[in-house]
Amino acid sequence: MTTSTSARTRLTPEQRRAQLLDLGLELLGTRSLEELSIDVLAEEAGISRGLMYHYFGSKLGFYEAVVQHAADDLFDRTAPPPDGEPLERLLACLTAYVDYVIDNTVGYRSLVRAASGGNDAVRAIYERTFTAMGERFFSVDSGTIELQPTPATRLVIRAWQAMVEDLVLAWCDDPAGLTRDDLLRVVTGSLPALLATLP
Amino acid sequence: MTTSTSARTRLTPEQRRAQLLDLGLELLGTRSLEELSIDVLAEEAGISRGLMYHYFGSKLGFYEAVVQHAADDLFDRTAPPPDGEPLERLLACLTAYVDYVIDNTVGYRSLVRAASGGNDAVRAIYERTFTAMGERFFSVDSGTIELQPTPATRLVIRAWQAMVEDLVLAWCDDPAGLTRDDLLRVVTGSLPALLATLP
């Protein structure tokens, strides 16, 4: 107890805020966004609600900070590996994505739902991340398969992302006889298959 | 004016209600669900708000009736033609779907958004229609391509539907250099391409 208190007092406000965001992210593994209130996090972190408002300004500020942190985390975790064949790198990205959704199904589903529904702040964060993940296909450095950045390719990539999201979330509810490897084969193989339908 | 009034008085309440739902549907071509209130419809139909409540019971009753009517309309319009080769029938279905979304972009987008967001009644109607449209692939009578109704095929069909929905709505915003025919080639060709990725 003494150790933990002294460790806590040594953190800067930025570090403490980051620590609280990590805790919020962890809670999102098994809770929806709606269930993740300032009260819940204050209780889990063992600090007062007043201090939570000190760190996040308002309920909305807290909510947005957690969503942004979750989106950054997803983006980082699905970064393509620096080396390897294009399709291997694509598979590595998609494996990281699938595992992220498996590990954070409840929170991820609630994020998607909030973004599709009327929450403008969540939608903006979601759209930025979704677009940034799609843009990885158009840069040499990003690895995976490299595509020509035409408007039509962008349109198809976006729709493919929507499909993968729906497929992986539905698979988490009911695997329908598909193993994780089968699922990975479908999501990885579907991208070149879909691009081949373009004129 | 006299003609219109006498024609109106000859309608049964069921006919009048159906007429109001048709008008609601028509308005959804250019308005979102949120913009379509009992007041707007009462004004467009030239009847009192009191009479609207008589026909629909409540604001929610009205809202749900219009959404159900829109969903039934979409389902009917995308029915496969009775004859033809499987891929031709699939193309006919998808052409009807694409044209429906083109003609009703604003209302359709708001329906999808309301269903993905927190509106349970809209979500239930949307999900039933979405599932029924997907189930057409598993019946001999429904035409189009006929598939084995395995859980894995159902999972992929569902994800493909989500992709087509996203793709067509995004194309309505920005065609990205693709003609309507190009778009139809992508949505039609993507289904067999996607199914081929299953183990």
Image: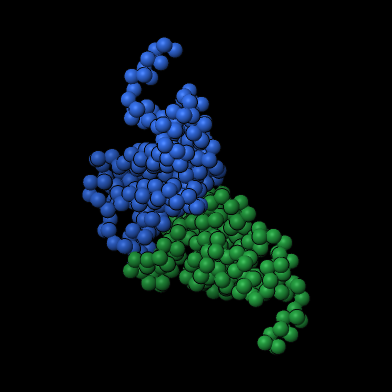
Chain colours: A blue, B green
Identify the residue at image location x=31%, y=52%. A135
- Please state the horizontal and vertical placement of residue A139, each as a whole percent of the image: 25, 51
- Please state the horizontal and vertical placement of residue B126, each as a whole percent of the image: 59, 58
Q: Quadrant of the C terminus of chain A?
A: bottom left
Please determine whether, in this image, residue B34 is positioned above or below residue B88.
above
Q: Is residue B15 left or right of residue A101?
A: right
Identify the residue at image location x=71%, y=65%. B53
Q: Is residue A163 left or right of residue A192?
A: right
**Which residue lies most toward the left here?**
A140
Q: Is residue B58 left or right of residue B127?
A: right
B139 vs A104, nearest the viewer: A104
Q: In the rendered image, which quarter is residue A19 located in?
A: top left
Q: Quadrant of the N terminus of chain A?
A: top left
A69 vs A198, nearest the viewer: A69
Please determine whether, in this image, residue B119 is positioned above or below residue B73.
above
Identify the residue at image location x=45%, y=41%. A60
- Please state the horizontal and vertical placement of residue B23, each as a whole percent of the image: 61, 73
Identify the residue at image location x=47%, y=44%. A111
B90 vs A69, nearest the viewer: A69
Please determine whether, in this image, residue B26 is positioned above or below residue B195.
below
Q: In the rendered image, which quarter is residue A158 located in?
A: bottom left
